[in-house]
Image: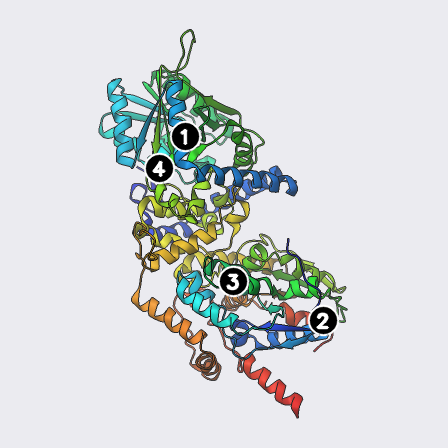
Amino acid sequence: MRIYPAKPIKAYFYATCLVDMFDPEAGLDAITLLEQQGIEVIFIEKQTCCGQPAYSSGYDKEAKQVAQSQMDLFTENWPVVVLSGSCGGMMHHHYRRLFKDDENQAHVDAFCDRVFEMTEFLVNVCRVKLNDKGESTSVVMHTSCAARREMNVHVTATQLLTQLDNVEIREQAYESECCGFGGTFAVRHPNISQAMVEDKTRHLSDTQASEFVSADWGCLLNINGALEYQGKPMRGRHLASFLLERTGGK
Amino acid sequence: MSQSNNGVHIQELAPEHFHDQAKAALADPQLRQNFRGAMDYLQDKRKTAFSNPAEEKHIRDLSEAIRQRCLSKLPDLLEQLETNCTNNGIQVHWAQNAEEANAIIAAISQRHNAKSIVKGKSMVSEEIELNHEMAKLGIECLESDMGEYIVQLDGDKPSHIIMPAIHKNKQEVSDTFEKNLDNFTPTLDVDELIQTGRSRLRQKFHDADIGLSGVNFAVAETGTLCLVENEGNGRMCTTVPNVHIAITGIEKVVEFLTDVPPLYSALTRSATGQAITTYFNMISSPRRDGELDGPEEVHLVLLDNGRSQAFRDEEMRKTLQCIRCGACMNHCPVYTRIGGHAYGTVYPGPIGKIISPHMMGLEKTKDLITASSLCGACGEVCPVRIPIPEMLQRLRNEAKNPPKPDMPAMRGQEAAASKAESLAMKGFAFAASHPSIYHMGTWSATKMKALMPSNLGPWTQCRTAPKPASKTLHQLIKARKQGEKS
């Protein structure tokens, strides 16, 4: 179990490359949520990508180069809040493995220690109390595998939804099962990935929830793409946008 | 001979054909239904067996620590095991590979003029293709584990390490019996099917010249071989025939007798959700003077077959912690959908992906190590906490790159190296560590999104193409800051 620090005055925000490209509004929404907690959010413009595409494809050397370039950007001892469990897992856990026995190891460990996924930061560091101002609705959430199994933040994401009084949370069948994204896995093994995402979209649709949210854009790219391909009306959006909308922040 | 997975001939399954085998399995609705149903059942059983999270944690802590301690002393423990087994009258043999193991078993068989070997369940015997090799010498191997028996009748192969015939439903088992057994009336009554198998097997134990089994735990301090089973066939194989041959991988040794209970508990709960199995056998010697039963000779064959390659590397050594419970495959979203045959390896599923490269080399297994979304469901249930996703990451790196300067090469090192991909990854790494170049790229992607092709090959076979936003977050934040200033 992780030990969380007191709420800081400032925090770095790591948007992730997918949010930057595909859902920048979710990035702005998350920044607003953090600012509402009285935190000064620092967005380092030189940030790019955590390096996961190289890492999971077997290119440790290249991943390490990217990791080093990202860590170099966050020089002050503020927390780094990441808008994805998957990139959070990369920066909180896998950077350590990449730099094991490296001369920089202690420095890397110190960086990894201050990486937080957004929902765990809101719940366990900010102790956020959300005030639901929306109409009554139902929501189904998909949690990424890294968020669940590397970061253990499916718990905090659910806690945030539970704080919303007018939101009924629907649970899909096989909730903890992977959606079939896995980065390059989806294109290296397209048939297996297809079988997985088709099951996932069916289980999500079967809940008949009005809203579908996730805190990971990798999964959303995969699941939304499949939902659209199948002609289904359901679309997922980032949890940060949903939370901000419910609390009247936009 | 059986056909599996939509016409792929069962004997031709190989990891090199993983893509085709997986595709065929995915297109077989009966197979997928059989696996999904069976895996759901086994997941529930495990969950019930570990209903107390604190107890689960305790058992896994203990099991992981025991396995790591024993592996850290592996060479010494193996020597101790040999000494103590020998003192007990068990004859110990060392085999570096499948060929040597088969030669040892063949020599023992020929010395006894054996015509038949009755087998308890042993994955290591599958690993060395014992049945096939003995058949060449005119020695018949008879499977006595019910699942293995069904699979053997049908000329099929195991699709799971604990439940070899899990890919067949009761109708398919009845069909197999009808095709292969005299005087069998088709039935869907599971008890009746089991009784049919048991009664046919009974005579075989008495007729066989040699009994062969695997080993779950080999205890170094006492020279004891432990065998975990539910059907009693293991006990029959190891006590009825005059000669007993046990075969196991070198990693199965444990230091103390007290190491066994926690590992046994972790194994049965993780595998089938049982608190304890119906039979637990401890074999410590051949028949002694004055004893009424038991074999007159007991042999132990210790097989390496690539395990020492995993052992020499501190990180990959964790692969050898495995106690073969099968929980990783029961919880794997890939295994659940394609079943065991598609992997084309003796050990399928997540553990198969990380152990097979050591046994067969990376050339043959390079598609297996990428066939994972790294979801981590396997590592989450592993009773000895093998970090399977990390092992996969490591193997992917070894398959793409030359060995590190101070490391010996793995078998098949660099087998998946691709100049084009390597160049692309170098390009990615360069761009991602040079923000101005990177942001030029994302900026153009948003500007030229109309040019995004709607056909992105494998991605768009079941999804629409991703649509970049009209402005990146970097642009929006710049605009936001300018808005604040004005």
Pointers 4 and 2 in contact (C-beta within 8 Å): no
Give the number of the mark in front: 1 or 4: 1
Q: In which quarter of the image is the C terminus of chain B?
A: bottom right
Where residue B205 sits, quadrant-wise, is top left
Circle on res. A87? none
Chain at numbered mark 4 = B
- Kind of residue at disc 4: Asp
**Mark 2: which secondary structure?**
helix
- Looking at the image, residue B483 sits to the left or right of residue B137; the answer is right
Could you tell which of marks 1 and 4 lies nearer the N-terminus?
A: 1
In the figure, B58 relative to A205: above or below?
A: above
Q: Distance between the residues labelled 4 and 3?
A: 42 Å
Where residue B88 sits, quadrant-wise, is top left
- Per the image, the residue denoted by label 2 is A246
Q: How far apart are marks 1 and 4 (CA)?
A: 15 Å
Where residue A201 sits, quadrant-wise, is bottom right
- The crowding category of the residue bearing disc 3, from other C-alpha atoms within 10 Å (few below 14, some 14 to 19, many at least 20), is many
Give the number of the mark in front: 4 or 2: 2
Same chain? Circles 1 and 4: yes
Is residue B177 visible from the viewing direction of this image? no
- Per the image, the residue denoted by label 1 is B121
- The crowding category of the residue bearing disc 2, from other C-alpha atoms within 10 Å (few below 14, some 14 to 19, many at least 20), is many
Q: Distance between the residues labelled 4 and 2?
A: 57 Å
